[in-house]
Image (cartoon, rainbow, N blue to C red):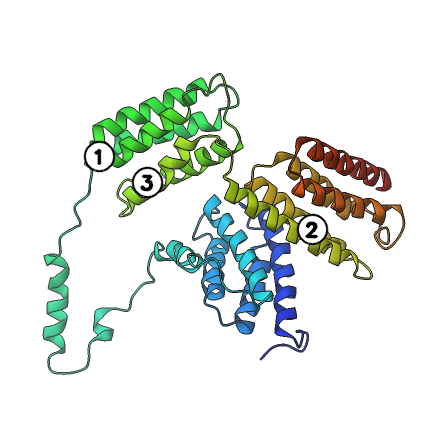
């Protein structure tokens, strides 16, 4: 039964829970290793499951609880899933149809990899009957008749691969000093892949070598850097070589590595513009609340920053970050009236024009408006 503090309207309740979830998500993204914000996220999803019958919420809650307990590491793919949960909350609060059918399966997949809970002893499960002793003896013999699953690779082959992966990770962590060590480590991985004699690891190592072919003279851009980070995290997973979906995983990574720093497709760009315009519209609506909720506005700016990051629009990330800082640092009441409110509205109008701009001149003009408004907001903040 909902608590008396919940809104009578379930949609309003979901919107409130989404704001709480976003607050926890923001804290977790800032300190994923510390687990900050996970408790807030779990509490919001637990209440959400009571308001909305969709199966996403229990699965998402189970995943976040496992992360909170340390049963799963805070990997990049889990943080991305947390962002997709936020988008699912937004759709649910607006009564929109689910447009992410793979979300539930991807939420359940990490949980299936966890060790199963200890089972009660066989004697406790057997019925009390004259055949109980016979059945118990049969059950004791069955494990002896089972055969271990045959592995793909011999221990010596796996050891060489793991050593090359460890060297690659060390070179990746020290890449700021020199990219040459990373290139050398990738070639070592290629050599160990040849020893394995399996097409999937060899194809992945070759794609890594091609992706970093000119890394000495031209460091990777944000798109390739994100792909390399994801690939290296996956390589470090225990049992990567023996994973039943090894070929499928490699098939997903190789095209992204081969694409390198190719700009986002027109479709992804269109999706970014649509999502960003929705965030801007919500920010303008939030400014009309009396008094404006500065924490809510800051979370909206953070969402805009994340969208720009996914779309590889660094200028949009920079503007959204400055806008978030302004929302957090402006004195209370400044957004109710006065110059600060007008500068925020001018900044939002400039961002809207920037998203709609289809020519370099229009883009430059919109960028100038945004920079001017943000500079004025910086002067309005306490020094």
Q: Position of residue 49 (x, y in %)?
A: 52, 69
Circle nearer the viewer, 1 or 2: 2
Q: Residue at x 82, y 47 (%)?
A: 330
Among the two numbered marks 3 and 2 on one chain, the one whose residue lies closer to the N terminus: 3
Q: Residue at x 49, y 36 (%)?
A: 226
Q: Residue furthest bottom?
A: 129
Q: Is residue 255 left or right of residue 318?
A: left
The residues bearing labels 3 and 2 have C-alpha atoms spaced at a distance of 37 Å
Cβ atoms under marks 3 and 2 closer than 8 Å: no
Q: Which residue is mark 2?
A: 280
Q: Secondary structure at mark 3?
A: helix
Circle nearer the viewer, 3 or 1: 3
Residue 21 vs 30, above or below: the answer is below
Residue 267 vs 173, above or below: the answer is below
Q: Is residue 91 left or right of residue 203?
A: right
Among the two numbered marks 1 and 2 on one chain, the one whose residue lies closer to the N terminus: 1
**How many marks can you see?**
3
Residue 301 vs 317, above or below: the answer is below
Q: Is residue 66 left or right of residue 206?
A: right
Rendered image: mark on residue 251: 3
The residues bearing labels 3 and 1 have C-alpha atoms spaced at a distance of 14 Å
Q: Which residue is mark 1?
A: 198
Cβ atoms under marks 3 and 1 closer than 8 Å: no
Q: Nearer the viewer, residue 310 or 4?
A: 310
Among the two numbered marks 3 and 1 on one chain, the one whose residue lies closer to the N terminus: 1
């Amino acid at each position: 039964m909902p608590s008396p503090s919940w809104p009578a309207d379930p949609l309003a309740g979901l919107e409130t829970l989404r704001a709480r979830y976003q607050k926890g998500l923001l804290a977790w993204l800032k300190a994923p290793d510390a687990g900050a914000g996970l408790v807030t996220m779990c509490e919001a999803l637990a209440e959400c499951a009571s308001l909305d019958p969709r199966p996403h919420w229990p699965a998402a809650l189970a995943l976040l609880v496992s992360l909170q307990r340390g049963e799963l590491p805070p990997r990049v793919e889990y943080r991305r899933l947390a962002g997709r949960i936020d988008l699912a909350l937004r759709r649910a609060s607006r009564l929109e149809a689910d447009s992410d059918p793979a979300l539930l399966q991807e939420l359940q997949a990490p949980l299936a990899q966890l060790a199963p809970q200890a089972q009660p002893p066989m004697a406790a499960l057997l019925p009390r009957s004259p055949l109980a002793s016979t059945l118990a003896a049969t059950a004791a013999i069955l494990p002896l008749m089972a055969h271990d699953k045959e592995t793909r690779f011999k221990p010596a082959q796996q050891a060489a691969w793991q050593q090359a992966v460890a060297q690659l990770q060390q070179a990746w962590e020290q890449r700021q000093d020199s990219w040459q060590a990373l290139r050398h480590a990738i070639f070592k991985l290629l050599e160990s892949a040849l020893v394995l004699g399996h097409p999937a690891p060899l194809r992945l190592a070759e794609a890594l070598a091609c992706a970093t072919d000119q890394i000495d003279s031209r460091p990777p851009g944000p798109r390739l850097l994100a792909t390399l980070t994801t690939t290296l995290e996956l390589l470090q997973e225990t049992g990567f070589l023996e994973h039943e979906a090894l070929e499928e995983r490699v098939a997903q990574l190789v095209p992204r590595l081969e694409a390198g720093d190719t700009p986002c497709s027109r479709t992804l760009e269109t999706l970014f513009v649509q999502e960003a315009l929705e965030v801007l519209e919500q920010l303008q609506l939030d400014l009309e609340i009396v008094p404006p909720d500065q924490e809510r506005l800051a979370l909206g700016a953070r969402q805009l920053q994340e969208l720009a990051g996914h779309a590889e629009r660094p200028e949009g990330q920079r503007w959204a970050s400055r806008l978030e800082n302004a929302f957090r640092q402006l004195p209370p009441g400044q957004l109710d009236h006065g110059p600060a409110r007008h500068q925020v509205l001018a900044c939002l109008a400039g961002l809207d024009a920037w998203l709609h701009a289809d020519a370099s001149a229009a883009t430059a003009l919109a960028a100038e408006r945004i920079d001017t408004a943000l500079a004025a907001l910086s002067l309005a903040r306490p020094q």
